[in-house]
């Protein structure tokens, strides 16, 4: 009678059992830490929202932006509320100090060169100015398109008028223009692109223009108190 360990079935069963054991261990570790992972993701997300409003809150409360950020998590519920604006199907937050509305933060999405991207933008209370941008999820090439997360690139999207008034009831979104990295812009709509990542840079502008257009059209169609 031949030894089972010498059969062809033995290594197959051995590998199968080994895989099942290790998959079980990984599944257990994931499940046991799932709540902590979700809590960390929630904290990171809320910190980004708070950070986008930090300058406005600091100005209204006569303090420093880093004090607002460092006061997380207490500062978040003190100034930030998640809201549902009529007609807007994007996750939305508002920031207020007392009865003074400081602006809205919208969770937006678009497509990059290699996959989808997610971002947060802050618009002024009257939805006329882009006050900030942070890209919190993207799949672009590290060192090239991935540089859209660098602060110098994001800082270009602060205090930008987002549309021109055509007439009393119609608005035209301003068009952003890409210029070479390092070249000084002559106006707020000229954005320095990432060197070697023109498509990704253009994708960010396309995401902003399309998403802001949708938000403006939705809010114009169903006006909210601003």
Image (cartoon, rainbow, N blue to C red):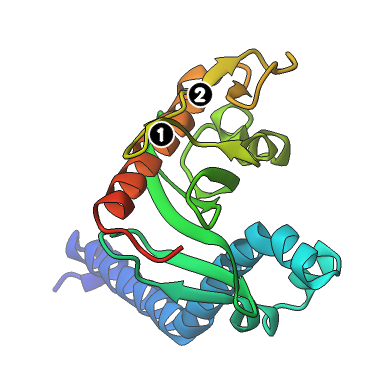
Numbered disc total: 2
Which x, y percent locates residue 45? Answer: 55, 66
Which x, y percent locates residue 54? Answer: 71, 63
Which type of secondary structure does the marked residue at label 1 adopt?
helix
Task: Estimate how packed mark 1 is, as few (under 14), some (14 to 19) or many (20 or more) residues with alpha carbons within 10 Å.
Answer: some
User: Farthest residue in the front direction?
Assistant: 168
Q: Is residue 64 left or right of residue 165?
A: right
Q: Is residue 196 above or below residue 42?
A: above
Residue at figure coordinates x 33%, y 68% from the top left: 19
Residue at figure coordinates x 64%, y 83% from the top left: 78
Q: Is residue 73 above or below residue 217?
A: below
Q: Nearer the viewer, residue 98 or 191?
A: 98
The residue singled out by tag 1 in the image is: 209
Labelled disc at residue 223: none
Which type of secondary structure does the marked residue at label 2 adopt?
loop
Which x, y percent locates residue 169? Answer: 32, 40
Residue 47: name its quadrant: bottom right
Badge 1 or badge 2: first in the primary sequence: 2
Q: Nearer the viewer, residue 220 or 63?
A: 220
The residue singled out by tag 2 in the image is: 176
Cα distance in 3D space between marks 1 and 2: 8 Å
Q: Are marks 1 and 2 in contact (CB under 8 Å)?
A: yes
From this viewpoint, is residue 51 visible? yes
From this viewpoint, is residue 3 visible? no
Residue at figure coordinates x 73%, y 13% from the top left: 183
């Amino acid at each position: 009678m031949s030894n089972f360990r010498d059969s062809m079935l033995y290594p197959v069963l051995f590998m199968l059992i080994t895989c099942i054991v290790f998959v079980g261990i990984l599944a257990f570790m994931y499940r046991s830490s799932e709540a902590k992972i979700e809590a960390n993701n929630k904290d990171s997300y809320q910190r980004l929202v708070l950070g986008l409003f930090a300058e406005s809150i600091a100005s209204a409360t006569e303090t420093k932006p880093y004090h607002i950020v460092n006061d997380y998590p207490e500062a978040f519920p003190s100034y930030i509320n998640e809201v549902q604006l009529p007609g807007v199907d994007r996750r939305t937050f508002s920031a207020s100090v007392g009865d003074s509305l400081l602006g809205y933060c919208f969770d937006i999405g678009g497509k990059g060169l290699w996959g989808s991207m997610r971002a947060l933008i802050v618009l002024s209370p009257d939805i006329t100015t882009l006050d900030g941008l942070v890209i919190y999820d993207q799949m672009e090439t590290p060192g090239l398109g991935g540089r859209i997360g660098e602060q110098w690139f994001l800082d270009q999207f602060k205090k930008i008028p987002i549309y021109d008034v055509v007439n009393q009831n119609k608005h035209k979104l301003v068009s952003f223009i890409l210029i070479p990295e390092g070249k000084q812009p002559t106006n707020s709509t000229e954005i320095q692109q990432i060197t070697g990542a023109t498509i990704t840079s253009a994708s960010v502008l396309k995401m902003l223009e399309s998403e802001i257009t949708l938000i403006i059209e939705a809010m114009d169609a169903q006006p909210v108190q601003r």
